[in-house]
Amino acid sequence: MNLDLISNIDLVIMAVYLIGMIFYGLYHSKRQNSEEYFLAGRSMTWPIVGISLFAANISSTTLIGLAGDAYSTGISVYNYEWMAAVILVFFSIFFLPFYLRSGVFTMPEFLERRYDRRSRYYFSFITLIGNVLIETAAGLYAGSLILKLVFPDISMTVIILVLAFAAAAYTIPGGLSSVVHTEVIQAILLLIGSLILTYMTYQAVGGWENVMAVTPADMVSLIRPMDDPSVPWTGLIFGVPLLGFYFWANNQFMVQRVLTAKDLNHGRWGALFAGLLKLPVLFFMVLPGTMARVIFPDLENPDTVFPTLVFELLPAGLIGLLMAGLLAAMSSSISATLNSASTLITMDFVKNLKPGLSSKQLVRVGQFATVILVLLAAAWTPQIEKFDSLFKYLQMVVGLIAPPVVVVFIWGMFWKKGNANGAFYSLITGFVIAAILIVIKVSLPDAGISQWHFLHTAPLLFLICSVIYVFVSLRGPMPSDAQIADYTWKNSIYTDETAAISSLPWYKNYRILSVFLLIITFVIVWIFR
């Protein structure tokens, strides 16, 4: 153990947290049937839904990555955070009502109802691969990097297995109810720790004027020129919303949290609450990375900014609190992806192949799937260190796999003529193009196309897949009446809803709350433009 970094009281705090989370998660377990195990009985209220969304999003890789990017390129990384608020407003108005009313367990299941089983299997497969080999493994890796600093004599393999066990200990027996309830505690702990670290960092730099003295003006601006390597303004307009829509409105491990809501209003309030929680991230997760340029101007690896601030600025006890917060973020991400991945396997594959299984048998399948998935993720995690730039690579991959998925969801919702063939062939086309681009970027990094920013490549791929979708759909039959009536938008939905919410007080009217959220977002962006 590295005694220079951590004290016995910090170790006690971390140990109490890990043990406490396991028992707290088991206490809130719901596993009597498949709906309780995979969707927490669809009984969650809006605060839990919102905090759970936020906690699942702010993973250990995000926590480290935000500070690291702010240190190296400036606050433009915050564009992904405030855009989430805008996306969640759109999601709450148009997509969430269809998701909840359909009673689906997974996003691929929704695609099957709108199109056919081919689209369901495709989306389920790529989501499953991404959840386990990218998101879960990346969370384990980021957590293991930090703990390796504290316990240099323990092998990374052992650390990874311990972290995986801690997250799986309550996820496997307790299901999504355990995951969601523990995420609430984890989010609160993370927010408290991050606020303390931000205050200590600000005190250490001696004021904002000292930050500006060593930081170029463009690094504290959200709107960047078109050739900016981080977030060019063209990518902000066309690329970031596309990736945000995929992450918040299509990604199983995020949407699954909203599917736990007890009714549509709680789902909407929870989604908007998550959007509100994303806005202060600028102040207690992004700006500390920029301020660190004053204190530690020569860090070789920007990803070490967050742990360096923790170990260098905080006293004993608070280090343990922040480390527990980091473990909380990692645990939230891992438990979220494990549960959503087991849901995909159980509901999209096993249930279709074995339709006679009872609800309790499906739960057993989900538990067994989680065990296999956590072992696969733990086995893959050590391989991640072989990649030179994992964070940028993951952004590139998401930028390539997201566009075709967003195409079939958005066109399918707002265009009645979109059919199963149009969806399937646009998905396959997008997959082939994405695979080719990834191979080119890896094997020919100096090629012209390899130099394209992923926020420019993503909207171009979206346009290509949209053309394929429309062309194939127009040449085929119209979807059935059931596919159109229950899964496409129509103006009567808005007018009927207007009458339904007219009697609600303003603070329960999601439209008014959406306007307030957008105004707050606009003010923050304008100030830091």
Image (tube, helix red, strand yellow):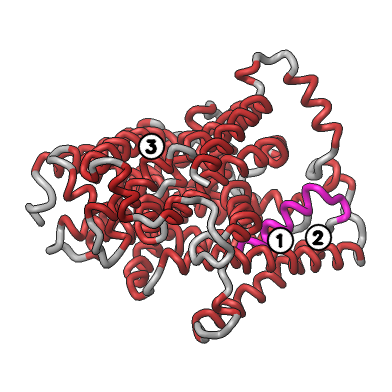
Q: Is 410 a magenta residue?
A: yes
Magenta stretch: helix, strand or loop mostly: helix
Q: Quadrant of residue 155?
A: bottom left
Reading the image, the residue beneath label 2 is 420
Residue 299 or 363: which is nearer the viewer? 299
**In this rendering, would 100 be left or right of 252?**
right
Residue 282 or 364: which is nearer the viewer? 282
For numbered disc 1, what is the local secondary structure? Answer: helix
Number of the label disc, if any, that sits on residue 418: none
| Amino acid type of the residue tagged 2 in the rendering | Ala
| Amino acid type of the residue tagged 3 in the rendering | Ala
Residue 150, can we see it?
yes
Reading the image, the residue beneath label 3 is 187
Residue 358 or 175: which is nearer the viewer? 175
Tags 3 and 2 touching, CB below 8 Å = no
Query: Magenta residues?
Result: 401-417
- Check disc 2: other Cα within 10 Å, few if <14, some if 14-19, many if 20+: many
Tags 3 and 1 touching, CB below 8 Å = no
Residue, x 37% and y 45% (percent of image)? Answer: 285
Q: Nearer the viewer, mark 3 or mark 1?
A: 3
Tags 2 and 1 touching, CB below 8 Å = yes
Residue, x 65% and y 30% (percent of image)? Answer: 515
Residue, x 22% and y 61% (percent of image)? Answer: 158
Q: Nearer the viewer, mark 3 or mark 2?
A: 3
* Nearer-N-terminus badge (3/1): 1
Reading the image, the residue beneath label 1 is 119
Q: Quadrant of residue 145?
A: bottom left
For numbered disc 2, what is the local secondary structure? Answer: helix
